[in-house]
Amino acid sequence: AMKAALGQGLPKALTVARTEHLRAYRLASQGAYDLNRGIVKRWRRIAAKDERTCLACLALDGREYDVADPGDWHVNDRCTLIPVTATYEELGLPIETPPEQHIETAREWFVGRPEHQQRAMMGENTWQLWRSGRVGWPDLASFTHSADYGPAAVESTLARLAQVAGLAKPKPGKPWAFPAGERLSEAALAELAAVRPQPAPGIVDHALPPIALPPKGPTPAPAPATAPEMA
């Protein structure tokens, strides 16, 4: 009945409702920021940190925008925004500004996921490129533009990542052909752990930790559970 009356099914209707509901929330927040420009300097994008979040949103987590910037949200985008405010000193108040509370970044969250989850979220080829250090974290996001809705963040395609990495896009089902056996080599992993990818313009890197190298040798088996001693 809904499809006949509205010309679309329930999944499409839910997508529109969710997207526009979140759009209204963000516009209201930005309107409040705009009215308080003396206090709010910018706003920061915060991504939902779970397996449902796309790579573009994870890559843009922590990016800061001008108060008047409408953002680059996509359909079903679950990211939120928080204000970046002036310090007490900048406001001319004789009060010491407390240290900013650290919010776990999407990159920190993702690095802490088990390898099988990282591979499942990224896809094998994208994971290999990122883990080898040939593409940086910000490279996972690209942008499109709509005449009706403006800019939108999207996941970078394999063709785009291949261009960034200077490699030819692999055939479907085939791994990346890294030169000289570089694919996930010890040298590549060590280089990735030592050198942090530089953030793209407009993206604030909040002291992201380097990626930890996997431990050498077999993973020790967990200790067998023992029954508690009876008193």
Image: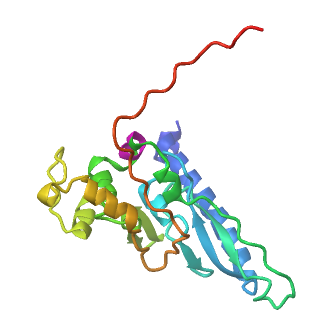
Q: Residue furthest bottom?
A: 92
Main SS of residues in magenta? helix
Residue 141 visible here: no
The picture places residue 117, in percent across and down from the top left corner, at 42, 42
Task: Classify 35 as above or below 170.
Answer: below
- Using residue 146 as the reference point, say whether residue 10 is left or right of it: right
Q: Which residues are magenta?
A: 116-120
In this view, the residue in front, 90 or 5, is 90
Magenta stretch holds residue 216: no
The picture places residue 183, in percent across and down from the top left corner, at 21, 53
The picture places residue 178, in percent across and down from the top left corner, at 17, 57
- Residue drawn at the location 68% of the way across and 14% of the way down: 228
Residue 188 visible here: yes
Quadrant in which the C terminus appears: top right
- Using residue 187 as the reference point, say whether residue 59 is left or right of it: right
- Residue drawn at the location 60% of the way across and 71% of the way down: 44
The picture places residue 9, in percent across and down from the top left corner, at 47, 42
In this view, the residue in front, 149 or 159, is 159
Magenta stretch holds residue 119: yes
- Using residue 138 as the reference point, say whether residue 90 is left or right of it: right
- Residue drawn at the location 44% of the way across and 74% of the way down: 199
In this view, the residue in front, 28 or 5, is 28
